[in-house]
Amino acid sequence: MAAVEERLEGGVGALDSDSVSPRLSTPPPDQPHQNNPLLGLPIVAIEAILNFLSYDEISLLRLVCKRMDMICQRMLNQGFLKVERYHSLCQKQVKAQLPRRESERRNHSLARHADILAAVETRLSLLNMTFMKYVDSNLCCFIPGKVVIDEIYRVLRYVNSTRAPQRAHEVLQELRDISSMAMEYFDEKIVPILKKKLPGADLSGRLIGSAPAKYPEIKSLMGPDPKLKWIVCMMVAIQFLAFYLVKDLDWKWVLFWTYAFGSCVNHSMTLAIHEISHNTAFGNNKAVWNRWFAIFANLPIGLPYSASFKRYHLDHHRYLGGDGVDVDIPTNFEGWFFCTRLRKLVWIILQPLFYAIRPLCINPKPITHLELVNVAVQFAFNAGLYWLWGVKPVVYMMAGSMLGMGLHPISGHFIAEHYMFLKGHETYSYYGSLNLLTFNVGYHNEHHDFPSIPGCRLPLVKKIAAEYYDDLPQYTSWIKVLYDFIMDDELSPYSRVKRKLKGEVKLE
């Protein structure tokens, strides 16, 4: 670790043009290359010579003088782009030889090659999201190139030259260690320096409190969504119709439509309740109307939770990651036990159960009158549905809610929103097509910046303040988020930021 930090500190010289090692004499400004004919050559010629060196050696030459620092920075930046292209070529060649069926791929002779290349792709993506925003802004170069690029090339050459490689975790152990340390050091030591050169933005580049002053039109987006209540009523009516239609189906078709349709609608309804919890149905002046409307929206879900969700969700916004307050943070047991791939899969399937139990363990609150009403209304509705049309609609309703919030494409947003796939970035947005079913909950950075703006207008926030959101880490697939979370051994329920809160904590 000390060696990595020592090497990375050499990269901070890129931030200050006067930072030159005192042990190496810099030529006088008026005679820059008098004592070193090499530095008098054209840049293209110098780069051609340096191409015979490793990236580790290139990085060390940055300390020679300002001109060499500039040339080496450029070569480190180009080196990362070159290794990305080389990896893409290797991956393309391997995929071209693999069969299309997944079952056949697992037993193919190139299966391990594909696994290693997929893991390298994840590393490259993490490095890209960490460094390239600042590189593209000309604030620094690809600082860890000296310890990372050479190792990536080593792995790729090993894959190309070995017919029976070791398992991915064995081959990539060194790369994972040095790249993780490099990203951690960059976030902790160097980003605070770079942050000073990004006025108007916080550490992640997001808008801060002065944003409405810079973009006054954002204030006009705040307020209720007049269409929300009608959309929710339509969704409730659709589920009521589905209850009627499934009552006479065979059980196999009940289960099929439960997962294929009911789970999607019910998960979407939970996110409608999320919208209503921010008073976006009737506005802040009619807060009670929003609470009662949330209980109505809760009916086709089958599980009474809308009143409790409002109380805990506001704590999540006020004290994001707050230890003992934010119940979105998994318990210590979850982080300790669900740490293997199989256990993480089980944890995702049982997410609805943990979300229900977690508040009782982390931050139990006195039961309110509205919560009792929510429970009474919901149980009465469930009983009436059973009495009217039998057990199949009840199974369709309850199982749809459990499946929709468990192992389901839409449930990827639970993981995508705040789990640290990239160190230093706590909140992520998703800009894929499933936002159409989820009231734009994927626009999560935008939502946490402006929680009083309804989901239908969050794309406008991103459009207005594109400079703050376009370069942030983001997802395009919730399914891939679930897959990566399960398969990446570095990720677990522990992959969350937990904060010790100080001062007075005002709970709902």
Image (cartoon, rainbow, N blue to C red):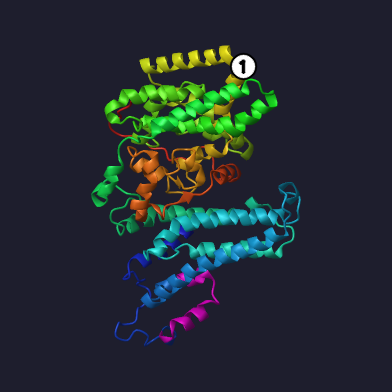
- In this view of the protein, which residue sits in the foreground, 215 or 505? 215
Q: Residue at x 47, y 62 (%)?
A: 144
Residue 238 lies, in percent from the top left, at: 52, 28
Residue 199 lies, in percent from the top left, at: 28, 56
Residue 114 lies, in percent from the top left, at: 67, 55
Predominant SS along the magenta part: helix
Residue 391 picture quarter: top right
- In this view of the protein, which residue sits in the foreground, 346 or 244? 244
Q: Is residue 357 magenta?
A: no
Part of the protein shown in magenta: 40-60
Q: Residue at x 71, y 57 (%)?
A: 165
Q: Residue at x 37, y 17 (%)?
A: 370
Image position of 442 with respect to 334: above or below: below
Q: Circle 1 sits on which residue? A: 391
Image position of 21 with respect to 261: above or below: below
The kind of secondary structure element at disc 1 is: helix
Q: Residue at x 61, y 54 (%)?
A: 118
Residue 22 lies, in percent from the top left, at: 34, 72
